[in-house]
Image (cartoon, rainbow, N blue to C red):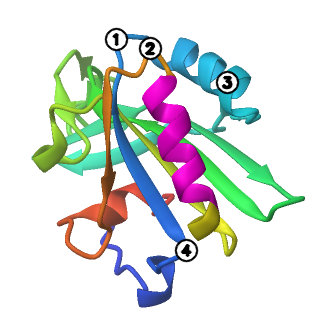
Amino acid sequence: MKRFKLEDDLLHEDTSIFALVSELPAYRLCFQLNNDLKLQLRRSPEDKSYSHKNHIYHFTSFEYHNKQLDLFWWLVENKSFYSEAPEVFGSSMLLSRPLLTPFKVFDFFLCCEGEELLAFNQFLKTELKRLAYVRTFKQLDTSTIKNIEVLFIKE
């Protein structure tokens, strides 16, 4: 299993993470957020993978780089229902596991990174409140969350 060390400069005050509760499937939530927040999130070339107790869990993810505002967005599913057992070649099964266990009640993470983000945070909170398909949300403090690096590291 690969081990990663998160560099201090990867997590800084220019990153916002919102944990979302939504009944929509990932592709539909992505479509709705694109329409309502004027984003252009697209499916990531590879799902976010996380290894735990000899299983590799896969989480659907979407990303978008707004070059005009220099903001990088990503949407990650918090619940995986698919895992692989690498010790058994070709073995896969349906197992449920959250990406960040302390936030298992949330379905998705909407993350944004960029220098102009502080002014944008209030707008984003207002917009998320008005979206009927987002039941609730919480802005997370990146400095206090254990295992937050799983949202940032690409294998």
**Mark 1–mark 2 contact, CB under 8 Å?**
yes
Q: Position of residue 32 (x, y in %)?
A: 62, 17
**Mark 3–mark 1 contact, CB under 8 Å?**
no
**Mark 4–mark 3 contact, CB under 8 Å?**
no
**Which labelled disc corresponds to residue 102?**
none
Gap in angstroms between the C-alphas marked 1 and 2: 7 Å
* Observer able to see residue 145: yes
* Observer able to see residue 54: no
Picture residue at 89% right of the left edge, 59% below the top = 68
Picture residue at 34% right of the left edge, 58% below the top = 150
The amino acid marked with disc number 4 is Asp
Magenta stretch, residue numbers: 120-130
Q: Residues within 10 Å of mark 3 (few under 14, many from 20)?
A: few
- Above or below, comparing residue 32 to residue 120 in the picture: above
Asked which secondary structure carries label 3, the reply is helix
Q: In this rendering, which labeled residue sits more in front, label 3 or label 1?
A: 3
Task: Say whether residue 102 is left or right of residue 15.
Answer: left
The residue where tag 3 is placed is: 36
- Above or below, comparing residue 60 to residue 67 in the picture: above
Q: Residues within 10 Å of mark 1 (few under 14, many from 20)?
A: few
